[in-house]
Amino acid sequence: MSASVVNPPAAASLLVIPSPVIWAYFAFGSVFAIGLITIFLRGDWPKARGLDKLILLGPLFYAASLAAFGTEHFTVTQDVASLVPKWIPWHFFWAYFVGSCFIAATLSLATKTQARLSASLLALTFFLFVVLMDIPAWAHEPGNRFALALVLRELSFSGGALALAASLTGAWRDRGTHILATIARYFIAIPVLFYSFEQLLHASRVPGIPLELVTPHWLFGHAIWTYLAAVVYAVAGIPLLIGKKTREAATLIGLAVFFVVLVVYVPIGIVERASLTGFNYLGDTLMYCGAVLMLAGAMPPGAQPPESTP
């Protein structure tokens, strides 16, 4: 009877998962577990109230996703090395070097060991990605909205790390603000508003970061999640840009992204479990969520941001 119920090819497909995908999920799960244990051992979780608990998870979302991408520098090295600009020598060296740095930095963020240094270097790294790779690629196709979305995604990743670095400085602890946090706010607020516009125009695409993937027809709600993200981005993105209720605005955006991760990208990751594509969309969006939440954590609570200090 069981033989007639079980489909052998379908059952076997559950076990046939390529090693790059396995390593990506392993790195993600390991760093996430380490970070979660650290949060509880330090007593941070009981101290956080309400949505501050979600903000507390921001660096962990960012670090765990980045750890998985770091492993791809070793498992699909050829693909990663091909992204290095042709005028830069030693493509494979840079693929391995950046991958190693990503993994080391994520462990630093997860354990909160030298986290300010790691966050600062990550902010610089992603900003260099924007300047050296993403903007030149977009310049070749200025009408390509997906290329621009990638530029703004990497800028947001830089902004999230920059916000975390700012929140770990003495000036921020004393005054509740820092000039780097203000810069990070613009790095994230501008992409949020662009993404809002894009999602309203192209609701058939996946929500969160409006890239090429079309929302699968089997997904419950389909375009409604893209419209929902677009509306939240517009409502919260404007005050975030002009500096009003910045912590609340960034938290609302982060909550919206986390929601679409759960209802859209987790199902896609499950269905596409044997493909790096499924994980990469999930990891990218969760990392973006983490970047926005790290910005929320760097914004002053319950008030408009005071005058920035260096």
Image (cartoon, rainbow, N blue to C red):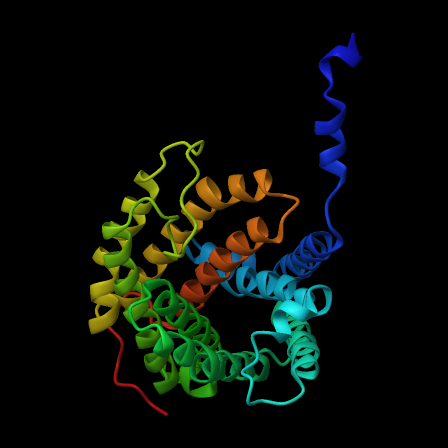
Residue placed most toward the observer, 310 or 200: 200
Q: For residue 109, what is the image quadrant?
A: bottom right
Residue 309: x %, y % from top left: 33, 90
Q: What is the residue that sits farthest to the top in this orientation? A: 1
Residue at image location 53% in from the left, 66% down from the top: 59
Can residue 115 be spotted in the picture?
A: yes
Q: Is residue 12 left or right of residue 194?
A: right
Task: Tell me what residue is drawn at x 37 percent, y 77 percent.
Answer: 140
Q: Quadrant of the N terminus?
A: top right
Q: Position of residue 58 (x, y in %)?
A: 49, 62
Question: In this figure, what is the number of numbered marks?
Answer: 0
Q: Is residue 11 above or below residue 207?
A: above
Q: Residue at x 24, y 71 (%)?
A: 241
As displayed, is residue 258 above or below residue 268?
Answer: below
The percent position of residue 98, horizontal first and vertical second, equals 64, 79
User: Does residue 27 lie above or below 5 as drawn?
Assistant: below
Depth check: 264 or 64 in front? 264
Q: Identify the residue at horizontal 43%, vertical 63% (top origin).
A: 293
Residue 220 appears in which quarter of the rendering? top left
| Res 139 → quadrant | bottom left
Is any atom of residue 233 visible in this view?
no
Furthest toward the bottom, the residue is 310
Q: Quadrant of the C terminus?
A: bottom left
- Please name whichever residue, 134 or 107, is drawn nearer the observer in this view of the structure: 134
In the visual, does 200 lie left or right of 255?
left
Residue 75's x, y, as percent? 72, 64
Left or right, 18 with reference to 176: right
